[in-house]
Amino acid sequence: MFSIKRISAVMCAGALALSLGACSSKETASTSKKEEGTGYPTKAISVIAPSGAGGGWDLTARSFTKVLSETKLVKQPLTVENKPGGGGAVFMAEYATQQVENNDMLFVNSPPIIINNLKKEGNSPYGYNNTTPLAQLTKDYGAIVVKADSKFKDLKSVLEEVKKDPSNLTFAGGSAPGSMDHLVSILPAYKYGVDPTKIKYVSYDGGGEAITALLGGNADVIGTDASSVKEFLKAGKVRVLAITSTERLSGDFKDVPTAKEQGVDAEFTIWRGVFGPEKMSEEAKGYWEKTIDKLVQSPEWKKEVETQGWELEYKNGADFKKFLEDQESQVQQLLEALGMQK
């Protein structure tokens, strides 16, 4: 027979076990909640293309956000915003002063982030040192382009015309004087012995606007990135006279000779990368470096790069920053040769 005391002891032990079980459940739930995390990112991410629609920055930003969303590598909404002005310099001034800790705003850029900071005219006091370089994604090349019905059939015919009278033709590009499209436009002429300061260059806010100017007869020649004219080439609206690559490209550009093939030693590589704010948190920086590393290895990204006519060339944050330091020295030398350094 159970005594009252024993029954009481058993009941107490049972109650204690239930109590401990309940505590354990609460702790598990709490731990689970912590593991799920409420860390970065917690809200929508803006990816800025500091140009108008249709150019290389715009296409890169849209491809980047599209594949990140499609692969579900980023759960938060991703939006692309166009903020044109000064070949990227206007946005850079805002970003480096007003968005210095905004982890939820990234932007894409290319050599202009270096060029704008080093050139004399329209100089920007801000450069890649006012950002957190996250990754290089791709590389592209410059292209010298005319309308499909232009009298110019090759690069030499344009250069001969410019040599006779540098003001005879209007060159255009989607960036400010002294910036990337300007350098692409005048580099072949400079290498051909023409004074680059005599060439008439008109700047537009983005490659898309420059192509519109060409097709509308407001420019004779444009210097831009090859990928941004791919669809116009396929549609038969433009003729690409030369590519500034070391070797002839494949695909849609397989029939386009390099400048070097035509006896003009003008090579120019256009990289594109992603940047965060200068005072980006370590958590946000780590998140993006891991996420972009997964992105570039995905088959979806590789397919997108091929579709856009780019070449995949990935560098992580540390390698990208080192590359930018090296590129800065090269750009400084080029601007000095052209008399455009600050």
Image (cartoon, rainbow, N blue to C red):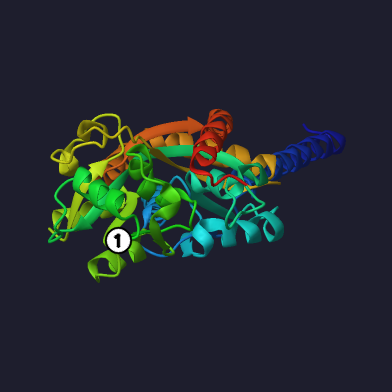
Relative vertical location of residue 138 with respect to residue 233 in this rendering, above or below? above
Left or right of 35 on screen, residue 301: left
The residue that mark 1 highlights is 168
- x 76%, y 43%: residue: 19
139 or 317: which is nearer to us? 139
Q: Is residue 295 visible?
A: no
Task: Give above or below for 205 relative to 308.
Answer: below
Q: Give the mark count.
A: 1
Which residue is nearer to you in this view: 281 or 174? 174
Dot 1 amino acid type: Asn
Q: Nearer the viewer, residue 309 or 158?
A: 158
Element type where label 1 sits in the image: loop
Label 1 neighbour load within 10 Å: few <14, some 14-19, many 20+: few
Looking at the picture, how far across and down is residue 11, in whole percent?
Answer: 78, 40
In the picture, measured across the screen, residue 26 lies left or right of residue 218, that is right
Spot the residue most to the front. Answer: 164
| Residue 154 seen | yes
Q: In which quarter of the image is residue 207?
A: bottom left
Q: Residue at x 57, y 48 (%)?
A: 119
- Is 334 located above or below residue 110 in the figure? above
State the image coordinates of residue 65 (x, y, percent, origin top left): 42, 53
* Extreme residue toward the right, this view: 5
In the rendered structure, the answer to whether residue 240 lies left or right of residue 68 reads: left
x and y percentages locating residue 38 in the rendered image: 64, 50
Q: Which quadrant holds the N terminus? A: top right
* Residue 190 spot, x, y in % from top left: 38, 42
Judge left or right: residue 62 versus residue 255.
right
Q: Which of the 4 image quarters holds residue 294?
A: top left
